[in-house]
Image: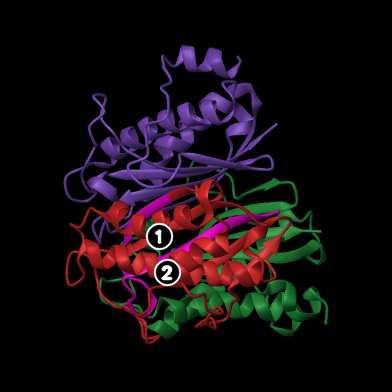
Chain colours: A red, B green, C purple
Amino acid sequence: MSVYEKLKALDITLTAPAAPVAAYVMYVQTGNLVFISGHIAKNADGSINAGQLGKNITTEQGAAAARSVAVALIGTIQEAAGGDLNRVKRIVKLMGLVNSTPDYTDQHLVINGASALLGEVFGDAGKHARSAFGVAQVPLGACVEIDLIIELA
Amino acid sequence: MSVYEKLKALDITLTAPAAPVAAYVMYVQTGNLVFISGHIAKNADGSINAGQLGKNITTEQGAAAARSVAVALIGTIQEAAGGDLNRVKRIVKLMGLVNSTPDYTDQHLVINGASALLGEVFGDAGKHARSAFGVAQVPLGACVEIDLIIELA
Amino acid sequence: MSVYEKLKALDITLTAPAAPVAAYVMYVQTGNLVFISGHIAKNADGSINAGQLGKNITTEQGAAAARSVAVALIGTIQEAAGGDLNRVKRIVKLMGLVNSTPDYTDQHLVINGASALLGEVFGDAGKHARSAFGVAQVPLGACVEIDLIIELA
């Protein structure tokens, strides 16, 4: 299946990148690499998906939030790729930040929600290097923030 | 205005990079990309600008600290560019770390102090991808730490 | 001394990369750059070296943990380099995450354990840009997590 067939099979509709909440841009391309800004978790209505793992967000909820962030990232990738996701050669590196209490230690399971979706959608090209960890907070209190480095063909 | 005219108009004097506080170097170039080490916030006298957002540093103070870190980063960029800031093709990616209590959520406003200055000085070349988030602590207790990836022409 | 002579002089035996604890891969190469996933601190028996600086891990223990993570990273670099560490042109960037209480501020000394080893083993090619900071938690409670960007010849 092509990337677009996979998205359809997963019933995922891409959206245009949200406007940055501050003085930066959502992605920058240099050579074949695209550096994508941190995307924070949002609810279906566009509001911030706020909360902290270990406090008021479960691992399952966190993984679902990470998956939704990955959907938003794919929307940004599509724009960076000039509208054609088939130009994605590789998801290179993912940095996954989990809004965590000092004793929550399942950040890897939370960020798997994003990693798994990238694998489902992009296949081998979606297999990425990754760092996941717990942060003290995320802008606007979002429960998850993820950024990416990708390679375009 | 050129980069140097803008710096003059902003009354900014660049300084040479500080010596690293540990076993590393302040930047490494690979191809056209330069990876710049995390720079921590300092006061005008060179002492560490220590403190934590949500505890004893206000958002306004944090943004001013982030701006001063950006000034230091531009000094390092100048050295990395062999003394000529006109060789900067793009500020590619900024990672902004805000020393935060578990309930402070305006990291984006703090790091805007750095992002805005880079935009003012470098214009379109200063528009960067960004991830900003709250960390539990920063070396020496500094309130802000920022690193960069830039592209040289 | 060559890289392998240095490893022998330091009595370091490399190991194959551990399997990722989640849905990602241990490294991705793009062009001459290799992005290496976050490696977490482990004990000699392979169990997680868990704990938090400022709570139940001393700076010296943290630095030793960071050094052991660097040994694991060199094992992964060797695999990424097709078995030949002499292909390493430069350790470009290190991100060092220290599992920290809100008042522990010697993250730079902890991560020096990794930076120093990379310098010992790779000489000038081991001098890297670096960001080190304190995070709220690390997956599985590990006391240190480190990722790398390297350049191959």
Residue range corresponding to the magenta coloring: A131-153
Q: Which mark is residue A69?
A: 2
Residue A35, given in percent of the width and then of the height, sits at: 60, 62
Decide: few, some or many residues near mark 1? Use Cα within 10 Å; few <14, some 14-19, many ≥20.
many
- Residue at 75% over, 52% down: B32
Please report contact status of discs 1 and 2: CB closer than 8 Å, yes or no. Answer: yes
Check disc 1 and report the residue beneath it: A114
Tag 2: amino acid: Val
Residue A132 included in the magenta stretch of the image: yes
Q: Earlier in the sequence, mark 1 or mark 2?
A: 2
Q: Mark 2, chain letter?
A: A
Residue closest to the eye, B131 or A39: A39
Residue A32 included in the magenta stretch of the image: no
Residue B70, given in percent of the width and then of the height, sits at: 59, 70
Residue closest to the eye, A30 or A136: A30
Residue closest to the eye, C69 or C130: C69
Tag 2's secondary structure? Answer: helix
Q: Is residue B8 above or below residue C114?
A: below
Q: Mark 1, chain letter?
A: A
Tag 1: amino acid: Ala
Quadrant in the picture for residue B81: bottom right
- Residue at 43% over, 36% down: C114
